[in-house]
Image (cartoon, grey):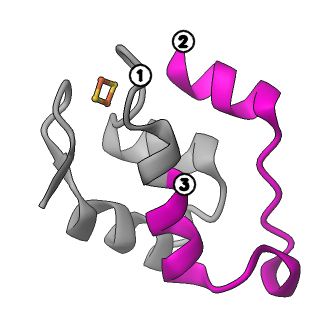
Amino acid sequence: MIVCHCAVVGDQQIAAAAAAGATTLSRVCASTGAGRDCGACVFSVRRILCESVGSEADHGLVTTSAEVDRAAS
Ligand code: FES
């Protein structure tokens, strides 16, 4: 399923990036190209990332609103 329509990035690519060690939203966006244009997909990317790596508390995955803004810019 395509998650980022601007960069044509799918959920499998996001999950693969997380599995390869991109455990923050910024890293996933940098490695896949998702979330770097209009930003509409950022929360979907974050959800898939969280599903891929488990709960935020378990993995120290904290995404601040500033990080979301940065990923979308
Ligand atoms: S849909 Fe992902 S940046 Fe636009």
Asked if the residue at label 1 sits under 8 Å from ligand 1, the reply is yes
Looking at the picture, which amino acid does disc 2 mark? Answer: Ser
- Magenta span main SS: helix
Q: Label 2, on which residue?
A: 73
Mark 3 or mark 2: which comes first in sequence?
3
Q: Classify mark 2: residues with Cα within 10 Å, few (<14), some (14-19) or many (20+).
A: few
Q: Label 1, on which residue?
A: 36
| Observer-nearest of 2 and 13 | 2
What stretch of residues is rendered in magenta? 46-73
Quadrant in the picture for the N terminus: bottom left
The local secondary structure at tag 2 comes to loop
Looking at the picture, which amino acid does disc 1 mark? Answer: Arg
Residue at 83%, 57% in the rendered image = 62
The local secondary structure at tag 3 comes to helix
Q: Is residue 72 left or right of residue 24?
A: left
Asked if the residue at label 2 sits under 8 Å from ligand 1, the reply is no
Looking at the picture, which amino acid does disc 3 mark? Answer: Arg
Contact (Cβ within 8 Å) of mark 1 with mark 2: yes
The local secondary structure at tag 1 comes to loop
Mark 1 or mark 2: which comes first in sequence?
1
